[in-house]
Amino acid sequence: MNSLPPPLPPSGPGAPGAVKLVLLLIVLLTLCLALLGSAFGQTVPVALNLPATISADVHPGATTLDLPFSISGADSLQFDLIVPVDGATLALLDPAGAEVLAAGDPSLAFHPGSAQQPPLPGGVFVSPTLADPADGTWTLRLRFPPAGVPTVALGTVLARSRYQAGIAIERNTLLVGEDVSIGMLVLDDGKPITGLAPTIGVGIGAGATPQPASDDGRGADGLADDGVYSIDYTFAAPGLYDINASVTIPGAKGPVLRQASAQVRAVAPLLAASAVRLDTLRGNDNCVSALRVSVDFNVLQAGSYATLVRLSAPNGRSIDLRKAMAMGGAGATVVASFPAADIRAKLAADGPYTVSRIDTLSLGGDELTLAFRKLDAGSFDANLAALCTPPILLEAGLLATPVLRDGHIDSLDLAFPLTVATAGFYQISFKLIGADGQDIELVNASRALAKGPNEVRVNLASPRFLLVDGPYRAISLLVLQGATSARLANLGGTPAYSRWQFHPARAGDLDGDGAVGPADAAILAGFRGARALVPGDRRDLNRDGVIDLRDARALQSLR
């Protein structure tokens, strides 16, 4: 016999509270029954301009699945989602709960797994690019028939922004005591953003105190207005350091916050420099024969090491010397000498010359490890005039001056510097070649030279100028006196003179065969309508500044 239903709650005082309790129980029971077929993923924060992975388990019997993710400051949004359950539909909800992409939206592509070989369950949803997505938590909502087996829905979300920010640092492993430039790179569509005020904090764990970073080209910042805002930092102890940077960018929709982070490890150096000594070596007449850098190392771990010493000039040029040696526990000294000839040829500028970098690598193990670094280790107060001069000093610096005749170039005056330590007669020769390496002339410029700087001048008129275009280059300079010689591969070049600018051996002879004929008329026809070159152009026979039919008629009269 069925039991009777329980009596209704009594009326009177307290009855409304009892009714509310029953209704609450009914609502909770309904929610529990609904949740038996539902599942939720954890909210995934999506960093800008980096793909983020979202996933959630699909349990047997489940019919719905929500995958939430949060974005902020994005200009566009795109996703793809692998759903290994047949019959699934997908909707995208914005932070207000409104459907931005409804189930069956034609812009939401679906690639069925059944089309694969072998066939797979479910498929892949691929979204269009959505512009200006709102800040907040978005939801990918799946609905499908009851799942038969446990599986996983897996997707990728990409939120893009025109504003990009990142950490700029030379490498991820640094040395204790090393002075390092740490930067925050800030870009707008790939272009540097200037005039900002970022902060960068460096520390272990929560111990990072933000400090202002600058993009003014001074101090730690190597180049002004390149979008890299830098600070100078010295790692005081070994450990794993967090770098956190933040910047506010003025945007059309209001301020945009961008943050960037990185981790670097500071390790104890394998070497320590007890002294860096700079010596100026002198030659005859007290000239500077070489600049010598000596580094005294305390070796903390014996092994094989390679050291680079860099000497830099104010013009930005530098010379690198490398030394490799085994270093034991008793200490070691690395010596790098920069000869005067190298300083003159490679730096080509007055000092002061700075020892801008000393790097030592450990050669043991499977990879090279930085064992020591010192920047701006000192400077030499010297200039080119104080450097010792070799017996014959050759310097690139050809100067070409056209000599005109009747409005055309008749010859070229060529001049170049030559410094000798002893006065006397010197054999001097070089080769002049055309733009494509064609021989023009082997030039003999032998002469008597005074002690010290000289200017060698030679006038060159060659019929080859009528056949070969410039610019012309002077190469293979050779200077001899007795047993002393010097060579220079490339002396320099001339402006881009054209063959048509040189004085003709015969007016109208354009092909250089000594006669005026049909071949010359064909050449002239190929330039019809062109502007004449300055100075002189032997194609412009009537000298009106244009190569045209009137020049062709003039050519006929010269045949």
Image (cartoon, grey):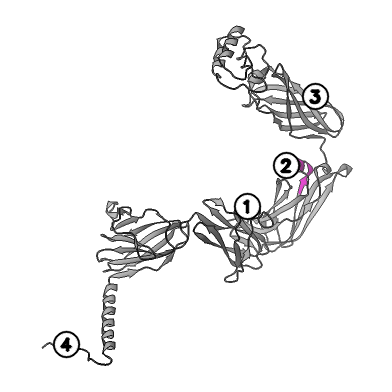
In the image, 500: left or right of 295?
left
Would you name the residue on which mark 1 appears? 225
Q: CA distance from mark 2 to mark 3?
A: 27 Å
- The circle on residue 346 is 2
Would you name the residue on which mark 3 appears? 446
Q: Is residue 150 visible?
A: no
Q: Amino acid at mark 3?
A: Ser
Q: Please name which of the two marks, 3 or 4, marks the residue nearer to the observer.
A: 4
Q: Is residue 142 visible?
A: yes
Residue 454 picture location, percent across and down: 82, 31
Q: Please name which of the two marks, 2 or 4, marks the residue nearer to the observer.
A: 4
Q: Please name which of the two marks, 1 or 2, marks the residue nearer to the observer.
A: 1
Q: CA distance from mark 4 to mark 1?
A: 82 Å
* Mark 2 or mark 3, earlier in chain: 2
Residue 161 picture location, percent across and down: 48, 56
Disc 1 on helix, strand or loop? loop
At horizontal 80% and vertical 32% (from top left) the residue drawn is 418
Range shown magenta: 337-345
Q: Looking at the rendering, which quadrant does residue 289 occupy?
A: top right
Would you name the residue on which mark 4 appears? 5
Q: How many marks?
A: 4
